[in-house]
């Protein structure tokens, strides 16, 4: 699901993002919006473009119906023409809902060297 999410972001695949993200999805990232509607809308409109993302050091821990993914990203995003690039520590929270895993929350914190 992690790979599918990253590919959907780069390809601006709104249908896949809509399927993966929970309706109550919450984003904590250096962007204006923090919910599914605004995030997917900005990807669809091109206001948010993910030029590349390389994810490494991925670990997943499952706690019943909840899974936590942590990783390290090297990425370049364009947000309303402003470049956001660098290294980020990622934390994603997935929940098993009606037999399907949904991404409920994503937090990305810049890593300063």
Image (cartoon, rainbow, N blue to C red):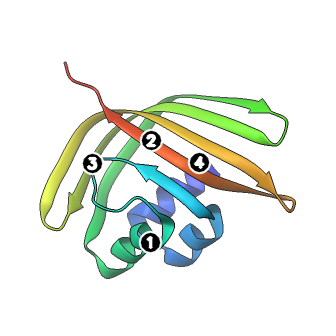
* Percent position of residue 50, x then y: 32, 59
For the residues carrying marks 4 and 2, which lies nearer the camera in this image? 2
- Residue ID for mark 4: 2
Q: Secondary structure at mark 4?
A: helix
Cβ atoms under marks 3 and 4 closer than 8 Å: no
Cβ atoms under marks 3 and 2 closer than 8 Å: no
The furthest residue to the top: 113
- The residue drawn where x is 54% and y is 31% is 70
| 11 relative position to 31: left or right | right
Q: Of callouts 3 and 4, which one flags the residue occurring earlier in the amino acid sequence?
A: 4
- The residue drawn where x is 63% and y is 63% is 20
Quarter placement of the C terminus: top left
- Residue ID for mark 3: 30
- Say if 108 sits above or below 89 in the image: below
Q: Which of these two is toward me, 28 or 1?
A: 28
Residue 40 numbered tag: 1
């Amino acid at each position: 699901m992690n790979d599918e999410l990253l590919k959907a972001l780069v390809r601006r695949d709104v249908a896949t993002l809509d399927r993966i993200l929970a309706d109550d999805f919450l984003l904590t990232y250096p962007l204006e919006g923090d919910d599914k509607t605004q995030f997917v809308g900005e990807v669809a409109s091109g206001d948010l473009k993910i030029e590349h993302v390389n994810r490494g050091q991925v670990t997943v821990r499952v706690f019943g119906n909840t899974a936590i993914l942590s990783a390290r990203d090297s990425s370049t995003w364009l947000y309303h023409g402003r470049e956001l690039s660098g290294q980020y520590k990622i934390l994603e929270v997935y929940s098993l809902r009606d037999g399907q895993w949904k991404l409920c929350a994503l937090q990305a914190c810049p890593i300063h060297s």
